[in-house]
Image: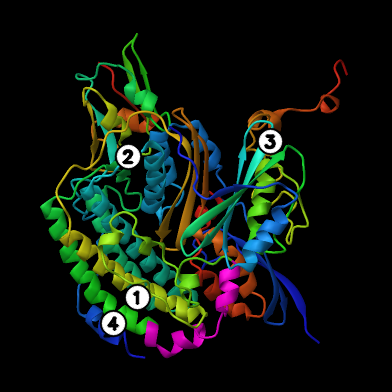
Amino acid sequence: MFGLLKKTLSNLFSRPATRSYPGTTRPGFSGSRGHLDMDPAVCIYCGACSKRCPTKAITVSREPKEWKLEVGRCIICGHCVEVCPKKCMWLDMNHGLSKDAVTDARSGDRQGNP
Amino acid sequence: MAVSLPDLKQVTVDTIAAEVTDKFRNGWRFVTMTCVDKGGAFDLMYHFDKEYKLVTLRIDVPHGQPVPSVSGIYFAAAVIENEIKDMFGMPFTDLAIDFNGRFLLSENAPKAPQCREGSGIDLRMKVPAEAQPAEGK
Amino acid sequence: MAIQSLIPFGPQHPVFPEPIQLRLVLEDEKVVEALPAFGYVHRGLEKIAQQKDILQDVFLVERVCGICSFIHSLTYCRGVETLMGLTVPDRARFLRVVWSEMSRLHSHLLWLGLTADAFGFENLFMQAFRLREKVLDLMEATGGNRVIMSSCCIGGVRRDLTPDLVKMIRTTLDEVERELDPIVVTMRDDYTVQQRTIGVGRLTKEEAYQLGAVGPVARGCGIQMDFRTTGYEAYGELEFKPVVFEGGDCYARCKVRLYEMLQSVALMRAALDKLPEGPLAVPVKGNPDGETISRCEQPRGEVIYYMRANNTRNLERLRIRTPTFANLAPLLKMLPGCQLADVPVIVLAIDPCISCTER
């Protein structure tokens, strides 16, 4: 009957198990899959990522050079990162949009045009 | 080179009840049933297991032909037969529990969605001719 | 004279993790009949799987269920590897075992929290979920995400475990084992827990076998059924025995899962000790052809995948039968005759994963 009593008493004298987010944030793990980022300077707009995406979240066109990601459709699987011939995409470890994509945050899309 | 299923036995719709009863008497556990739409007919497979060895019975059912249910022999088959009835529109006779096509699908769902042709959103959105409003009124 | 009433139990109910409706016909407090109503999370995944090619289907199949996500993708990859004649390298086989056991540990901790909550033991619920956070941190560090690890691919695994990560896993496993001890002892020996679970939802061994019960539901009735003993992946090289208890009631099923948690910790340590060096995956070339069946042991029981391919890049048919689907028939047999207050305990004793059942 008193099996958990020791744990309860030790909880009285220790720190709380939760942290006061958003005041303190948890340091992420380096291998985490947060969101997709790409480098438009390296991309050759071949369209391989668009063909292989399981949810058709990426649209690529050659004329005019355009790379568009619908963030709501992306399941952050990383298949596009593996099939890209130039390795121009990577998965960032922070969830949410990148800091310098403020206008993208409003429209919900990320553009990667040169 | 095509990989084939080991321990597969082809039987007919008339003998399936006797074969399944034979498996029940010899202590085989009912695993599941699988239905595949081949075009003009269905392939209906019954899987049984005893001590980790899997055995399959397969019957060939033309579209619309009713199949006798085995839920009187194995009660667990009632659940999966209801699902196959929803998904493929295959009529089963003498089901132990019958959900009448409402096991997984709701009223607005397409009919027999996993069949090859004539399924999907086009069937659901098609309005019959007499329901369309008359012109010029 | 007894009063008859019809109660819709669900689909929204505090004890159910996922939506399922049970229509209970009651006489006073005793359940006379129970009829389930499904279809709240049916997504038509089997049809979608025919429209995507075999590499994209791995991501689809992982998302059938969040709790048993890795083992779904493992079973799918094993089936496609049989169809294409691929041999997985040794390091990948051991890594797959490590991740499978991690999935099993986190799933059983989730089950433990929900069952304790079902009969009001909120302290144990919080402790189990707090411990589960450590395992979820491990899954994020090694796999990339807290529930959908996405580390299995056709031909092997997508990620590697560096020596730092192996050390992190070992430290976390020591902490988990230390904190699991009071939880297991409480759940097993507490007077109130025993009063709520002993004798509830009784099934005999023959009934369970004939109704097609799998997993801890069958092992709690005394049936020796654990698909891991056939030795798929690297399980053949690790020594363990399935955890089986007689009794046939909810208490026996609880004990099976509690001891399986400790067994998972031991299996992970053994797999990490024997981890060989080598490549992580073999390249995938060509198209699958033929039909095959692949089976694995999920936390809830045996999952079976049937696949048929016709030498194109898409599968012609993918059929998934999850363990909760097989445990539905025993559930419908256990419910009549019990009290209304026992219904959540019985439903949680089969560990329902309704999104797996309805795909």
Occupied quadrant, residue C94: bottom left
Taking the image as shown, residue B7 lies to the left or right of residue B80, namely left
Residue that numbered label 3 is attached to: B41
Amino acid tagged 3: Ala
Which circle, 3 or 1, is nearer the viewer?
3
- Against C21, residue C337 (above or below) is below
Q: Name the residue located 22 percent from the left edge and 52 percent from the top edge.
A: C141
- Against C5, residue C189 (above or below) is below
Q: Percent x, y for residue B88?
A: 67, 41
Separation of marks 1 and 2 at Cα, in angstroms? 35 Å
Q: Percent x, y for residue B106?
A: 68, 46
Which circle, 1 or 2, is nearer the viewer?
2
The quadrant of the rendering that contains the C terminus of chain B is: top right
Considering the whole magenta stretch, tell me its main secondary structure.
helix
- Against A106, residue C128 (above or below) is below
The chain to which mark 2 is attached is C
Which circle, 3 or 4, is nearer the viewer?
3
Depth check: C345 or C1 in front? Answer: C345
Asked whether residue C69 is drawn in magenta, I would say: no
Separation of marks 4 and 1 at Cα, in angstroms? 23 Å
Taking the image as shown, residue A38 lies to the left or right of residue C298, namely left
Labels 2 and 3 in the same subunit: no
Residue that numbered label 2 is attached to: C86
Can I make out residue C177 in this image?
yes
The chain to which mark 1 is attached is C
Separation of marks 3 and 1 at Cα, in angstroms? 48 Å
Amino acid tagged 1: Tyr
Occupied quadrant, residue C181: bottom left
